[in-house]
Amino acid sequence: MILYTFKKGVNVIDRLNQSELREMWEDLGMNLELHDQLLESNSRLFKKTHLWQKKRPAAMKLFDRALHDSHGQRVAEILDYRKGGGKSVGTFCIYVPDEIAMAANVLTIPLCGGSGWSVSYADEMLPRDICPLVRSTFGMALSETCPYKTLKEYPLGETTCDAKKKTWDLFGIPAMEVPQKKNEEDRKLWISEVTTFMKDMEKVSGTEVTVDKLRDSIRKCNRKRVILQQINGFRRLKTPPISGLDALLVSQVALNMDIDNFISAGEELLEELMERADNDVSAFDGDGVRVLFAGTPSPMGYAKVHWAAETSGLQIVADESCTGIRYYRDLVPEDLDTLDEMIEAIADRYFKIDCPCFSPNTERFDNIADVIDEFQAEAVVHNILQFCHGFNIEAGALDKMLIEKDIPSLKIVCDYSEEDGEQIKIRMEAFREIIESKRNR
């Protein structure tokens, strides 16, 4: 077997060969035939959406590998962690506080599916006219192609949308209560939910969350988010050294990758981006139209709309979604002394997330306006997953603010299927032409 290492010297378990991977998947009770189809679909899509780029940073190979290893080597790492006494929970949303789980020696495993391949397998239990993310996720579970299905003590949901809430009920999944407003009473409710989450994690692992452990996990999670801030900060440049597609990939795998390995790989990418910036090396050919990508999250495996945009002359210079700025924007203070102070600070950090489940959600409008100015975006692309009513309706309200700023926008409502990719690309090309003509007026 080959030792699996990163340049900075962070080692994990020996890298498994194909035979050992298949034995591992079989032991997990997976349907190997269907899983092969899923992997083939994901690999083919990745080649289409990412590997056409000719000016990618060399360090992106680390994140390419992390994507392809998400059902293989990463699963082996989690199995090894659990054999050593570690515990894990499956999560569906960035509202679940990683810092607290980590301090209790509990690994959080993101379960959201981004593949159109698995959607039809959910139709035997779920309606077809609900969120593709929910159907993709549970389609993988029902088709026995999700290796994480049995790698956890339990999955943990949250109350950010009706489709999710009713799915949790259907499958008997517990959920954190995310308030729908941001008044002081709602903040207190959320702090109590975060406190309950900590107690639950202590029960799952048998490990007490102490001040020292929580402080260490806060620092590590902050470091991860600072690296994401720094990587994406290079996109402010007139000649961005990393594309929107590759920045998205980094954020996608950040949610699943071992945190130490991510920090190591991120530092290596940062070094290269700094060198590329010093030498004015762009990830793009020529001056494209600078675009802010807004809307629903793009989980691992889904990059269709980013691909359509950047193959049409648009340059995605910022992404405000849950797989973008919304995930890494805010940090937790590191200089607190008591456990209660830390729990409250963690709760406040997650309470700042500007999800459309909140009403009103003017915080998101203000954040988008700031990002447009900071990254000099000329336009906004709203990517809305089909049946995601919160983001879809909110896009209309956001457009009023964008009109005031003289920022054109395009709304793309779609699912995970491949059939509409070229149609979306045509709309992107027309959008680019409109903005370029606006430039020349």
Image: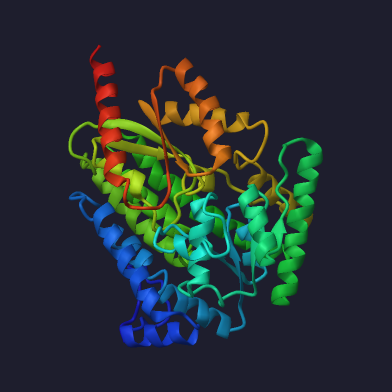
- Return the x and y of residue 393 as percentages of the image width and height: 55, 32
- Return the x and y of residue 276 as percentages of the image width and height: 24, 46
Residue 128 vs residue 301: left or right? right
Say which quadrant the C terminus sits in.
top left
Tell me the quarter of the picture where residue 435 sits.
top left
- Return the x and y of residue 381 as percentages of the image width and height: 40, 34
Asked whether 122 or 344 is in front, the reply is 122
Which colour assignment does the render follow?
rainbow
Say which quadrant the N terminus sits in.
bottom left
Residue 271 vs residue 224: left or right? left
Say which residue appears at 61% left-offset and 59% top-offset.
98
Tell me the quarter of the picture where residue 252 sits.
bottom left
Q: Tell which residue pokes out farthest to the top in this image.
A: 441
**Residue 393 visible to an observer of this rendering:** yes
Asked whether 223 or 56 is in front, the reply is 56
Tell me the quarter of the picture where residue 292 sits.
top left
**Residue 338 visible to an observer of this rendering:** no
On screen, 2 above or below 292?
Answer: below
- Return the x and y of residue 222 as percentages of the image width and height: 55, 53
Say which residue appears at 43% left-offset and 66% top-offset.
261
